[in-house]
Each structure stands twice: as C-alpha cells, then as structure tokens.
Image: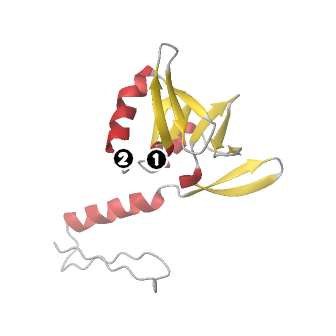
Amino acid sequence: MKIRLDISSEYREKEVIIRANKKDEEVAEILRNLQEIDTKLHNINGYLDNTVYSLSTQDILFFETNDRNVYAHTKDNAFLIHYRLYELEENLSDNFLRVSKSSILNVDEVKSLTQSVMGNLIQFRDSYKQIYVSRRFLKKLKLKLNQRKV
C-alpha cells in the first residue's frame, strides 16, 4: 500500500481518495476508519443566556454536569449544551477523556496535575478554572498526558 500526502493552500477542504483494483476487506476497513474520524464532533452549540454560540471542541477545556445539565467550559465562560456526558464520550476525539463521574476534559489543555491528600487537581492553560480527577480515572489520565504532543 502506498500513502501520499499533498498539502497546498489551494485546497478548500480535505479530500481523501482511495485507489484500489477491488474493494476488499482492507479498503472497507480504511473507509470505516475514515467515516469514524469524520463523525467525531468538531463543533458544538453552546447556550449562554439567550444566545447560541458555535464552539470549537479545541477551545473547550472540559465538560461538566451540574444539576442534570451539561456545561462546556472554555477559558472565560461555561456554556449549556444539549448532550449527555456519555454521548460526548462516544463522539469526541481522542484528546478528550472522562476523569470523573461528572466531567470529561480536553487533555491538550491541561497545564498541571497536582496530587494531594485532598484529591487530584487539574489546572488548565491560560485559565483560572480547575477540576478534580477521581482516583478511578487517574492512571488513564497519566498515561494520556505522557502520550500527548507537547
């Protein structure tokens, strides 16, 4: 199998072309993987007062439940969203990780993980916001932090 990458500012959107002499299991698997990547959430509608905002998932620090509502936290605001945490967990990209029963965080935005007697505290880049990680998810978070791109 040959793989080629052609990057140019002339292209308006990403396009993947698969050339094969027949549709076999390998081609089918490549298609399934590409479709899975394409269905991941990239933008989410967030509600603040009476205004709807289109939020890029890259800008979201973490998702958190509070009184049966789910909020997407950015550096400055918390937006109400119309998803449940389990739906987000299934549909977000791999840089999001469940860290407690009530929260999912964006691993790429983590500034520090502080372990203490009080708990495991996450602080985010360029933000005063912080959340706790439950012991149940701590090992997986440490693994993910070690694997992330710096």
Q: How far apart are marks 2 and 1 (CA)?
A: 7 Å
What residue occupies the far top of the structure in this picture? 117
Does dot 2 land on a helix, a strand or a loop? loop
Does dot 1 land on a helix, a strand or a loop? helix
Mark 2 closeness class: few <14, some 14–19, many ≥20 residues within 10 Å: few
* Residue under numbered circle 2: 148
- Which numbered disc flags the more N-terminal residue, 2 or 1? 1
Please determine whether, in this image, residue 93 is positioned above or below residue 118.
Answer: below
Q: In which quarter of the image is residue 32?
A: bottom left
If the image is split into quadrants, where does the N terminus sit? bottom left
Q: Percent position (x, y) of residue 72?
A: 63, 43
Q: Nearer the viewer, residue 36 or 102?
A: 102
Q: Percent position (x, y) of residue 101?
A: 53, 27
Q: Percent position (x, y) of residue 134?
A: 47, 23
Kindly identify the amino acid type of the residue bearing the numbered disc 1: Asp
Kindly identify the amino acid type of the residue bearing the numbered disc 2: Arg
Give the label on residue 108, or none: 1
* Count of numbered circles in the view: 2
Identify the residue shown where x is 64% and y is 42%. 73
Pointer 2 with pointer 1, Cβ within 8 A: yes
